[in-house]
Image: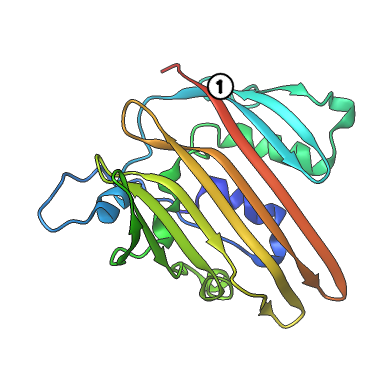
Amino acid sequence: MQSPLYTHLKAHFAVLMLCIGISIAPTAANAVNETPLQIALSRTSQGTIYRYDVEYQTDEIFSQYSVDPTLPSGQRVSVSTPPQSQWDADFAIELSEMDAEADTRIWCSDFAQNIPLNVAPLSQTDSTITYEFIPVATDEDDAKIMPNLIGLVTVTKNDPAIVEYRMYAPQSFKPMWLAKIEIFDMHAHCKRLPDGRTYVESLKVDISGKAGFQEFSENESWKVSSMQPVL
């Protein structure tokens, strides 16, 4: 199953054909021989439903809206800015996707399927461990991109969960004959809820390169705040 968060990104950055999976397996117990990473990757994204606020920005638009997944379809997103007269087609698509994925897009467990289970720690602090890896491709589109990227994931030592995730290209690469990616950097920071789940508190994506004979640059940021349980 594709992650709603990255299905959304794929629509904005189609030249990359980026497609990341979601993991919704039950939370693992602290079983013998399981690493903090393995426990973190098995966490569930299901639980209490939250309403929240989003600050969403691209090169073309700055927006703020509220999301309530318990409302009927078509009514879950309430935009405070910009006024509807300033919406472009891409922003209208963003709102439609957000309405459909109101309770599924925000969870950091969505990153799990592209992280290998057996990865050695890169560094650690008193409370976290960071792992470096080559992202796992889950389909043919992924296979054109993932081998060119480096992934970093940070998980907590206590009650392991993902608290930071990054994928970046250390150098330019060509995912296909007529496309060249000069910069790829996706960086998410996650925040823990009382039930142990972590959600994407902020996400920033920077991509630039050439497609055919045209240069392109896509920059997107997404911030979530005011998480309030509703169901």
Which one is in front, 215 or 104? 215
Please tell me how many numbered marks the rendered image carries.
1
Which residue is labeled 1 in the image? 68
Q: Where the C terminus falls, by quadrant?
A: top left
Residue at horizontal 45 percent and vertical 52 percent from the top: 111
Label 1: which secondary element: loop
The residue most toward the left is 32
Q: Residue furthest bottom?
A: 177
Q: Is residue 192 above or below residue 163?
A: above
Q: Quadrant of residue 85?
A: top right
| Lateral position of residue 159 relative to residue 148, left or right | left
Q: Is residue 172 above or below residue 38?
A: below
Query: For this view, does 184 lie left or right of residue 112?
Result: right
Q: Amino acid at mark 1?
A: Asp
Compared to 9, does 72 lie above or below?
A: above
Q: Residue at x 56, y 19 (%)?
A: 71
- Horizontally, is 163 left or right of 211 in the view? left
Give the image quarter of residue 13: bottom right
Left or right, 21 with respect to 131, comes to: right
How far across and how far down the image is residue 88, in percent? 85, 39
Residue for point 77% across, 37% down: 92
| Relative vertical location of residue 3 with respect to residue 226 in this rendering, above or below | below
Task: Tell me where residue 34 appears, x and y as whole percent.
Answer: 18, 56
- Measuring 58% from the left and 70% from the top, which residue is drawn there? 141
x, y (%) of residue 117?
30, 63
Foreground: 3 or 188? Answer: 188
Q: Residue 59: give x, y in percent of width and height.
A: 81, 46
| Label 1 packing within 10 angstroms: few (<14), some (14-19), many (20+) | many
Residue positioned most to the front: 126
